[in-house]
Image: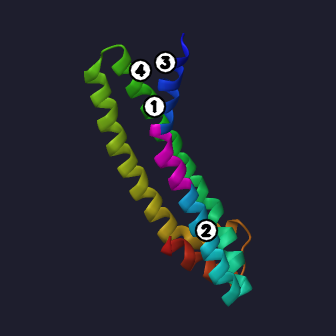
Amino acid sequence: MDIKSDNSTTKKIFTIALPLIWQQIFLQLQIYVDRAFLGRVNSEFFSAIGNVLVPYYAIISTITAICTGTTILIAHNIGVKNEDMSKKYAESSYLGNTIISVIMFVFFFFGAGFIFKIMGVQSPILEYSISFLKII
């Protein structure tokens, strides 16, 4: 394998990865800004943000893992020239992620109090956590 093909491969990987990297950077910046503003208003708000990030990252990680697995299956089927199966995986992924997202939204929007009570969060931080989770 020559160096030119390695550079080309690396460039392709970073071309795909760069938007995802920027997305994560901006997500972290959003969280820092939220913490900075809300923490200055009331230290209990800062605690609420910490509580909310646990279930939030669980959902984001789950959806990312499903998307990664789907991408691997689609790429594999494209590689073996099985485009019909690739399309089926893509359609299933779109439908599945939509359904999962709606279920998670309903679960966290209406079940936020239950989740935070299981985590041991108490008033007044409980109410702040529920409100913030519903916002994000």
Indicate the amino acid at tag 4. His
- What's the residue type where badge 3 is placed? Ser
Q: Earlier in the sequence, mark 2 or mark 4?
A: 2
Q: CA distance from mark 1 to mark 4?
A: 17 Å
Q: Label 2 vs label 4: CA separation?
A: 36 Å
Residue that badge 3 annotates: 5
Residue underneath mark 1 = 12
SS of the residue at dot 2?
Answer: helix
Where is residue 54 drawn, in percent x and y?
A: 65, 61
Lower sequence index among marks 3 and 1? 3
Q: Which mark is residue 31?
A: 2
The span from disc 3 to disc 2 (Cα, nearest Å) is 39 Å
Range of magenta residues? 15-24
Q: Which of pointers 1 and 4 lies earlier in the amino acid sequence?
A: 1
User: Which mark is drawn over residue 20?
Assistant: none
Q: Is residue 122 magenta?
A: no
The residue lying at 54 percent from left, 48 percent from top is 21
Is the residue marked by circle 4 packed among few (<14), some (14-19), or many (20+) residues within 10 Å? some
Say which mark, if any, is on residue 76: 4
Relative depth, front residue between 57 and 106:
57
